[in-house]
Amino acid sequence: MISVTNLSKAFGDFIAVDKLSFEVRAGDVVGFLGPNGAGKSTTMKMLTGFLTPSNGEIRISDMAMDKSSKAIQKQIGYLPEGAPAYGDMTVVEFLSFIADIRGLKGQHRKDRIREVIRLVQLEEVLRRPVENLSKGFKRRVGLAQAIIHDPDILILDEPTDGLDPNQKHQVRELIKNFSKDKIVIISTHILEEVTAVCNRAMIIAAGKMLFDASPADLQKKSRYYQAISLHFTQLTDISGLAELEGVEDMEVDRHNGRVTLFPEGQQDLMPAVSAYIRDRGLQVDTLYQEQGRLDDVFRQMTEEVSA
Ligand SMILES: Nc1ncnc2c1ncn2[C@@H]1O[C@H](COP(=O)(O)OP(=O)(O)OP(=O)(O)O)[C@@H](O)[C@H]1O
């Protein structure tokens, strides 16, 4: 378990992380979301013991970071931002080097190196220097070194940055499989990634925690949550739709003619809208209920802080 209390970090007069408090339990996959400069990487560096907090406390597995950082670091796999260091080593040399640092020995060491190469699919670049790899492969080498010692806690700073869509999918599957009884914390700018892999979303802006709940709860905060989106096959008088009971607002996209009906509260408008269409014999080619838009909530929350 990770327990963070009033964690702060100042660089001179600038407060990058401002009194964060949260707990993370085994099985949690947490997504740190936030605009550039929100303090996500700084928080991760403190959680991994690479940066000393200005204030507050970090406890991991009942050990205090300021007293037992070495013991804590053994339990953590960390993918920092950017590319792995020691770029002149080949991929296999680099992974062997990390395996040694992590204290792996004998057959177990060999097995783990082989296993991470397989999991992260590095076979084709094993003999190439890390610095000559594409951004996506560098990221995957970074991931491989993070999981080589099979840690209980995985902290990944933008793990899918620079990966193509297939590789993004693979890494997300890896994270999901990894996480059954472990802790994963990822930072990301990709909002769908949070719904795809995380059971908790934390929104951080200007160093402060703005939200900590499930991605589904985050979606519920969107004005599009349960909104009805529809498009008529032909030009149709739609004024009656706005008058339906429970409709708070109606918007029509001028470019594509798509109609969005926003409910009052969290009402389900679908029965009334379906009846309206059916009773008038109208033709629609699109009709669905929205899940809520994360980008909309994210923008709204983070703009309030920076305003
Ligand atoms: N060593 C440092 N010295 C001074 N300021 C720093 C230092 N490290 C980070 N900062 C500042 O702290 C703030 C938070 O940075 P951080 O890298 O944690 O943000 P982030 O949320 O990870 O952003 P991004 O999404 O762009 O990676 C930024 O304004 C950054 O410039």
Image (cartoon, rainbow, N blue to C red):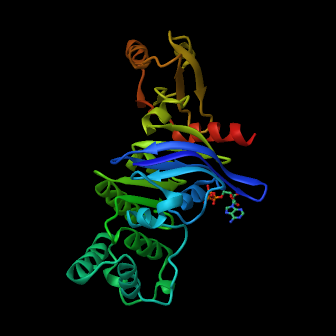
Give above or below for 167 relative to 263. Answer: below
Residue 77, quarter of picture = bottom left
Q: Is residue 157 visible?
A: no
What residue appears at the point 35 percent right and 79 percent down from the top-left corner?
99
Q: Residue drawn at (55%, 11%), measured in percent from left and top?
A: 243
In this image, 196 relative to 211: left or right?
left
Furthest residue to the front? 67
Indicate the quadrant where residue 19 lies: top right
Instruction: Reply above or below: 182 against 25.
Output: below
Q: Going by the image, does 55 lie left or right of 133?
A: right
Which part of the image, by quadrant, shows the C terminus?
Answer: top right
Position of residue 211 relative to residue 207, above or below, is above
Residue 50 showing in the rendered view = yes
Say which of 301 and 276 sits in front: 301
Q: Number of callouts in the render?
A: 0
In this orientation, which residue lies closer to the viewer: 64 or 118? Answer: 64
Which residue is at the far left? Answer: 107
Q: Residue 141 or 149: which is nearer the viewer?
A: 149
- Name the residue rendered at 51%, 38% in the picture: 212
Viewer-proximal residue among 200 and 120: 200
Q: Quadrant of ligand 1?
A: bottom right
Residue 117 on image: x %, y %: 31, 76
Residue 40 percent across, percent down from the top left: 58, 54
Say above or below: 154 vs 137.
above
Image location (x, y in percent) of residue 34: 59, 49
Point out residue 175 in the picture as x, y percentages from the top left corner. 35, 57
Relative horizontal placement of residue 253, taking residue 169 as reference (left or right): right
